[in-house]
Amino acid sequence: MPKQLIKAKNPHNQFIVDHIVELKNRCLRTGQDKLAFIYQKIIQSLQKYPMPLLCEDQVQMLQGVGDKTSVMILQLIKKQYQQYEIPFHKFNAALIQDNLDIINEQDDDMDQIFSESCPPSMVCVEDNTSKRKEKQFQASFIEELRKQVIKPIPDLQSKSKRQYQPGKNSKSGQVLMSLYKFQKSENKLFASKKQIKEQLREICNSELSSWNTIETLEKHQLIQKTVLDNEIKYALTEDGIKLGQQYFTETMIQQQMIAPSERPQKIILLIDNRERFQSNNRQIIYEKLINIYQIECRLSQLPIGDFMWICQKGDDEYICDYIIERKTIQDLAHSILDKRYQAQKHRLKHCGINNIFYLVENTQSSNLPVPRATIEKAIRSTQIKDGFYIQQTDTLEDSLRWLALFTKTVKVLPNAIKFSEFLYNNSKKAESLFNLWGSMLRGIHGVGLESAKAIACVWKTPIEFYDAINQDESKSLQQLIEENSIKQRQIPSHILRQIEILFQKEQYPN
């Protein structure tokens, strides 16, 4: 029976999948089960990754890829693309665009190139149908490369021509201003047609009657179009950003809404100085992020969370809309046992930051105090019910690499909340009597949040509750509950028995 082919999500990554499958099988034959498991994780990532791998940043985002595996995959990619005479650039996939004309000029030689590089299942020289599929594969390969490009294709013939530059008060200039204003204020790169129209009305008190304006800007490479969430959206190119910023600044100066120049700003990663790493040495981790990953960071006492970002603008510091709580799998298990987990999630949800991440580390660890199924259920609940983002890593080094990559994407303006205000709002206040009484009730086995709240709202203190249930011994706790209009579904009968034992019996029954 023939072996089932493991397919990559993107056919241009198939040669990588085939190579790693071969390595995994070799490890299984030689008894290297741990290494085979890592290769399996990489294969599963490639089965989900939709774009062709072209640069180091993309490779390192795959699960299971470490430094050695990354080098191996990059060498595979380099060897593969050298067949098309495309120079491989380690950090800038956009530069590949400059060489697409080489592919287009060598159409006559493409049949030979693809017959040598593609798997036999994809190429059959003597079959006309397969030749047509080859042509489609070649065209899709070139198109996939173009999709990864950030910079526009340089037009060599237009160098001598004057660059298109719409007037500031023209409809095209107003669209550039609107897109720039949207990116500046909404912290988003792409805007929909509706959002562009709203910005036009706000800034210029103008309507976009014809969509030809957008097409003209796209033709002259001042904006670029993409499809996100099944909707066409637009973003400024590098030239478009320069013009949009120039027009927007001039307009705001005229309207006396902003100062002529903006003060410089920078993004800083804050590390909670109470965070306990595996080596118990925060300074080493801090130095790794700075020296190895080139990330600007600072140790700070955070009231909540382990990592967050601020934008420093002059003397002021504003928080960015991201916060990360880091836990090893052992920490997570212990916090579930002692109920710190729920309280911590509650504080994170009310801290004023919208994008909350749980970084769960050392996921392959064993000897846990609770079953692994319980931990996985808690993680799923946190992701689906609470709306947190979950990132799982195997080691501390993986966590630092992910933090470094994430920090490089935080290139947006912060929201309006000052860091000092965030510290004040989230500093731990003294516990109120109501919360303390509720926590005492929740310490009784079986008493949940709803039951504790129902009792604490009627009897404000423990002594008040004790006097009420012991004042008239002829009345049961069930009758008191009914007299105070507490619904039976809030406090089930088996929980009432637990409370009666605690407050009415001299000792627990054997």
Image: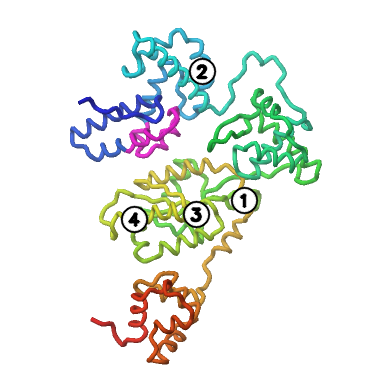
Query: CA separation, marks 3 and 2?
Result: 44 Å
Q: Earlier in the sequence, mark 4 or mark 3?
A: 3
Query: CA separation, marks 1 and 2?
Result: 40 Å
Q: Is residue 449 magenta?
A: no
Which span of residues is magenta-colored?
41-70
Disc 1 residue type (three-letter): Asn
Q: Tell me the quarter of the image containing the N terminus.
A: top left
Indicate which disc residue 375 carries. Answer: 4
Pointer 1 and pointer 2: residues touching (CB < 8 Å)? no
Query: CA separation, marks 4 and 3?
Result: 30 Å
Q: Secondary structure at mark 1?
A: loop
Pointer 4 and pointer 3: residues touching (CB < 8 Å)? no
Q: Which residue is mark 3?
A: 299
Q: Which residue is mark 2?
A: 99
Residue 86 x, y percent position in the rendering: 46, 18
Task: Examine the rendered structure and indicate whether residue 267 appears above or below residue 87.
Answer: below
Q: Secondary structure at mark 2?
A: helix
